[in-house]
Image: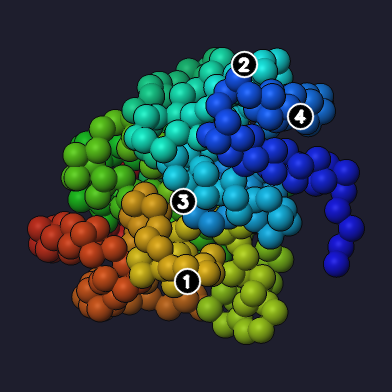
Amino acid sequence: MSVRTEWEVLVDRLLGDLAGGATAVGLYGASHPRADEAVRRISSELAALLAAEPELALVLLGEELFVQGRPFTRVSRHSASLIRRLRRREIEHVTVQPGVLPEEVLGFLSDLALTDDTAVRSRPHLHVGRIELSERELGGPDDTEGGARGRKAATVRDRVLLVHDSFAELAAGRGLALGDLTRVAHAIAAGLAAEPDPLRQFAPWDGGERWPAVHAHNVAVLSMALARDGGTGAGPCADLGVAALAHDVGKLFLPPEIASRELELTGDELELMLDHPRIGLEALLGNPEVPPVALVVAFEHHLNYNGTGTPRLARPRRPHPAARLVTLADAFVVLFTARGGRGLLTREGTVAWIAEHKGTVLDPDWTDSLLKMLESTAGGPAPAQPPG
């Protein structure tokens, strides 16, 4: 059994005091000495944890609780109790900032202790919410000289190059170029507005080196096209596009010889590949500006509709709706676009595989939407070269 660090011990203590504090408030009331003592301990622990951090983030994805990007469900003996509280109150992320006041902590505990449908409120230094497609305004792409990097993403080729460069920056340890991925998502949206057939917006196979960028681009195109057809607004569509572009970033941190033989792996190598959703989540958690939906998509895009797949769950459950959409787009793109060791199916063969796995691996409603879209665009094949 590995020795826990001082930070892990402090986080474990905080998780226990949050769960215990909510119980104390629920049983004895917010003015009881036991509630006061819980607030005092929690405030002290938060002050210590935030001494050198801009914020402390707790993210609940299914049955896994992450603190600052590190999984704590199996590390902390107190996590199960807090997870039950958070799930009951429909909270999927909690962010605490320096300066959080005792009265904010007490208000949070009081909300956690409630048994009715009253929503848990955010406070000035303590923010709570669900991981969902947000309607917040992201702003359009700025391709002027003063824009983020001044990079353009007008054509399919431009978009793929921008994604490729963004992935190279992340893999080199220089962080995620979120502005560039957002710019690509907006460019995809503009492209779909002009040409709604997503296959005509796909980038073609361009060799193994560019496959991660081509794959990410095409998954984003198909995900956004289906969401757009389903009535999703521009803001949520942009968030979804970023999530789809970043869904596989965990593979960027795998040894190249493993990533290049993805469908031929066995044993320990396969286990390493299956761990890429967790690796991707940890990489995205390092950027506080990443849309929350991108976190759950990165973590759940290999979790099947019936609850099997990765991550392995003790109790099967449905993945997040956005993850189910990206899972479908991911499968279609791999089957239809990828060459080399992965092979290439015809359009008909791809459609047959998708239909066969409807309701087990793939979400049946999104699958029906995709099949209907493909049927309506069956008159013309995707172009061999990207437009523009």
Three-letter amino acid code of the residue under disc 4: Arg
Q: Mark 2 points at which residue?
A: 103
User: The C terminus lies in which quarter of the figure?
Assistant: top left
How far is mark 3 from mark 2, CA to CA? Answer: 34 Å
* Lower sequence index among marks 3 and 2: 2
Say which mark, if any, is on residue 252.
Answer: none
Q: Which residue is tagged 4?
A: 41
Q: Tag 4's secondary structure?
A: helix
Disc on res. 297: 3
Say whether residue 103 is left or right of residue 207.
Answer: right
Q: Is residue 314 visible?
A: yes
Q: At numbered mark 1, what does the secondary structure look like: helix, strand or loop?
A: loop
Q: Quadrant of residue 153?
A: top left
**In-image side of 205 versus 166 (left or right):** left
| Gap between marks 3 and 1 measured at Cα | 14 Å
Helix, strand or loop status at disc 3:
helix
Q: Which amino acid does label 2 sit on?
A: Glu
**Circle 3 crowding by C-alpha within 10 Å: few under 14, some 14–19, many from 20:** many
Marks 1 and 4, how far apart in space? 40 Å
In this view, 99 is above or below 286: above
Residue that mark 1 sits on: 309
Measure the alpha-carbon separation of dots 2 and 1. 43 Å
Task: Please give the name of the residue rendered at 38% of the width and 24% of the height, measured from the top-left corner.
Answer: 136
Q: Position of residue 374 (x, y in %)?
A: 17, 61
Please state which of residues 297 and 318 is positioned toward the viewer in this rendering: 318
